[in-house]
Amino acid sequence: MKNPKQLIGQRISLLRRARHLTQNDLAEGVGVDSRHISRLETGKYFPSLDTLITMAEVLGVELQEFFLFPSVETESEMREALVAIAEEAPEPVLREILSFARNQLAQRRGAG
């Protein structure tokens, strides 16, 4: 499980990218260095409340948005999560996952 710094960093990154902003764009709006944004997004630093408030204003979101931690939100995140799992899985587990996925897709095609 990710720690709170990583979870908040992930939310910052997701919200920033959803608004098509670069780390530099967000840094300029917040009044910090782009390296600071990078460190926040990777969970190396924990943002201060003042930074989060300013960031929320720049991103046009409520402060609570930084604390919503669904495990997976978007289709692209689900795909990324599956790739990460596949990269770490040993061969027998990978074969089992692949077999399960193929069976699920075949069942869906048959039902549709």
Image (cartoon, rainbow, N blue to C red):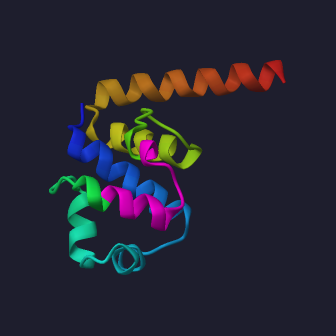
Front one among 66 and 18: 66
Q: Magenta residues: mostly which secondary structure?
A: helix
In the image, residue 14 sits, relative to residue 27, either above or below, namely above
In the image, residue 58 sits, relative to residue 83, either above or below, namely below
Q: Residue at x 24, y 57 (%)?
A: 42
**Residue 72 visible in rendering:** yes
Task: Using residue 106 as the reference point, say whether residue 79 is left or right of it.
Answer: left
Q: Which residue sits furthest right?
A: 112
How many dots with numbers?
Answer: 0
Magenta-colored span: 52-65
In the image, residue 83 sits, relative to residue 56, either above or below, namely above
Front one among 80 and 89: 80
The percent position of residue 46, horizontal first and vertical second, equals 18, 52
The percent position of residue 105, horizontal first and vertical second, equals 66, 27
Q: Which residue sits furthest left?
A: 44
The percent position of residue 9, horizontal first and vertical second, equals 30, 52
Task: Using residue 90 as the reference point, say whether residue 57 is left or right of it.
Answer: right
Front one among 77 and 20: 20
Q: Quarter of the image for the N terminus: give it.
A: top left
Task: Using residue 8 as the reference point, say whether residue 19 is left or right of it.
Answer: right
Q: In the rendered structure, does residue 108 fall within the stretch colored magenta?
A: no
Q: Quarter of the image for the C terminus: give it.
A: top right
Which of the 4 quarters of the picture holds residue 14?
bottom left
**Residue 41 visible in rendering:** no
Q: Residue at x 26, y 53 (%)?
A: 49
The percent position of residue 86, horizontal first and vertical second, equals 36, 39
